[in-house]
Image: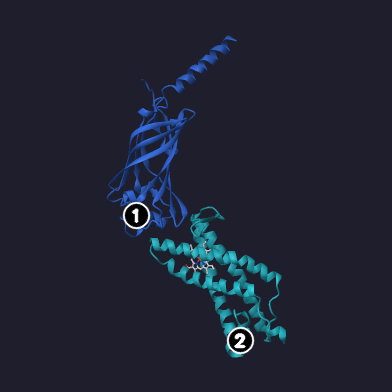
Amino acid sequence: MKIRHIALSAAALLLAGAAQSVEFKQVDTARSSLAFSSKQMGVPVPGSFKKFTTQIAFDPAKPTAASTTLEIDLASIDAGSKDANDEVVGKQWFNVKAFPTARFVSSGVKALGGNRYEALGKMTIKGQTRDIVAPFTFKQDGANGVFDGGFVLKRMDFNIGEGPWADVSAVANEIEIKFHVVAAPAAAAKK
Amino acid sequence: MSSYTQRYSGPAIAAHWLIAFLILAAFPLGLYMHELPLSPNKLKLYSYHKWIGMTVLLLFVPRLLWRLTHTPPKALPMPAWQHRIAEGTHHLLYLLMFLVPLSGWLMSSAKGFQVVYFGVLPIPDLIGKSEELGDLLKEVHEVLNWVLFGLIGLHVAGALKHHIIDRDSTLRRMLPFGK
Ligand code: HEM
C-alpha cells in the first residue's frame, strides 16, 4: 500500500517535471529529415536535402521563447534523378558555387493551441531573403521532442530557376517543404 | 464474292486510324525528346509523349474487345503464305500496341515520375522507384519500339502492295469514307 503510494507520487512528480521545463536542444540529425516536393507538368516529384544542420531551443512550456536556425548544404540535394541533381546545382537554379548554403533564422514562435505552433523567420537562399511562416506540430516521443512541419516556398521569390526555367507551367512555382526534426532534451538543463 | 468486298466496321476503322495516328506521333516525339538537354521544353515533350502513349493504351482496350467480339471481313484471295504473314503481323501489332505503352508506363513508375494524364489525372505507379529497373525498362521500351516500327513497315508495305500491285480492295475496306 505504502510502496504503491510512493511509486505513484514519484511517477506523478516525474511527469510533472517532464511537462514543466524541458528544453529540446540536441538535434538528432540521423533521425531528422528535410524533404520537398516540386511539381513538374503536374507530376509531384519528391526530393530531399541529405545534409543540413539545425539548432533548436524549444521548451513546450515556453514556446514563445523558442528559437531555431537551419543551414542547408544545397549541394546535398536529391531532386529525384541524376539529371535533375546535375541541373539544380547549376547557375540557373541554386548556383551552389556562389551560394552553397541556404539559411533560416527564426524571429519567433507562436503557439496555435494544442500541439500546433508556427515558426516565423527569415529564409535566405541565393542571396535573397524572405519572410517565412512555417506551421509545425510538436510531440514528445519518449525523452525526445519531435517536430513535424512544412510550408510552401515560392521558388521564384529566390530566383531558383532562371532563364527558361522561370516558366512555372513546366516546374510549378510552389515547392512544398517538409521537415521532421528529432531533438533530445538539453543535457543537464538547469534553470 | 460479296463477302470479299465487305468493309471493316465503323468502330474498327476509327480505332485503327486513331491509334495509327497516335503511334506515328508518339514515335518520332520519343526519338526527338530523349536527345534534348534538360529544359522546360523537354519536360513538356515528355509529358505530351506519355499522354499520347497512355491514350493508345486506353484505346487499345475497347479495340481489342471489339476485335474479339466481331469477325473482321474475310481475307481477299492471296497465296497462303502471304495470308499467314499478314495475320501474324496483325497479331503481333496488337501485342506491341499494348506492350509498348505498358513498358513506357512501367519505366515512368520505376524512374519515380508518376504519369499525370493531361497534367490533372494521376495514374497509379505500377512498380516502385528503382534506378536499375528504370534503366532496364528504358531499354525494353526502346527495343519494343523498334520491333513495332519494323512491323508497321511490313504492315504498310503489305497494304500498299495490295493497293498498287494487286489493285484489290484490301486497303480501301479499311479506309474511312471508302466504298
Ligand atoms: C504508342 C505508344 C508509344 C510509342 C510508339 C512510344 C515510342 C517511343 C520512342 C520511339 C521512344 C524513343 C526510344 C529511344 O530510342 O530511346 C520513346 C521514349 C520514351 N517513352 Fe515512349 N512510346 C509510347 C508510349 C509511352 C508511354 C505510355 C510512356 C509513359 C507513360 C512512355 C514514356 C517514354 C519515355 C519516358 C521515353 C524516354 C526514355 C528516356 O529517354 O529516358 N512512352 N517512346
Q: Quadrant of residue B7?
A: bottom right
Percent from the top left, x then y, of residue A104? 33, 40
User: Mark 2: which amino acid?
Assistant: His
Q: Which residue is mark 2?
A: B162
The Cα atoms of the two marked residues, 1 and 2, are separated by 55 Å
Specify few, some or many for label 1: CA neighbours under 10 Å numbering under 14, 14-19, or 20 or more. Answer: many
Q: Nearer the viewer, residue A2 or B105?
A: B105
Q: Quadrant of residue A84?
A: bottom left
Q: Is residue A9 left or right of residue B9?
A: left
In terms of secondary structure, where does tag 1 sit? loop
Q: Is residue B49 left or right of residue B158?
A: left
Contact (Cβ within 8 Å) of mark 1 with mark 2: no
In terms of secondary structure, where does tag 2 sit? helix
Task: Determine if the C-beta at disc 2 is less than 8 A from ligand 1.
Answer: no
Q: Residue at x 39, y 54 (%)?
A: A85
Colour in which chain A is drawn:
blue
Chain cyan in the figure, letter: B
Q: Residue furthest top?
A: A2
Percent from the top left, x then y, of residue A174? 40, 49
Q: How is the image coloured?
A: by chain
Q: Which residue is mark 1?
A: A161
Q: Quadrant of residue A35?
A: top left
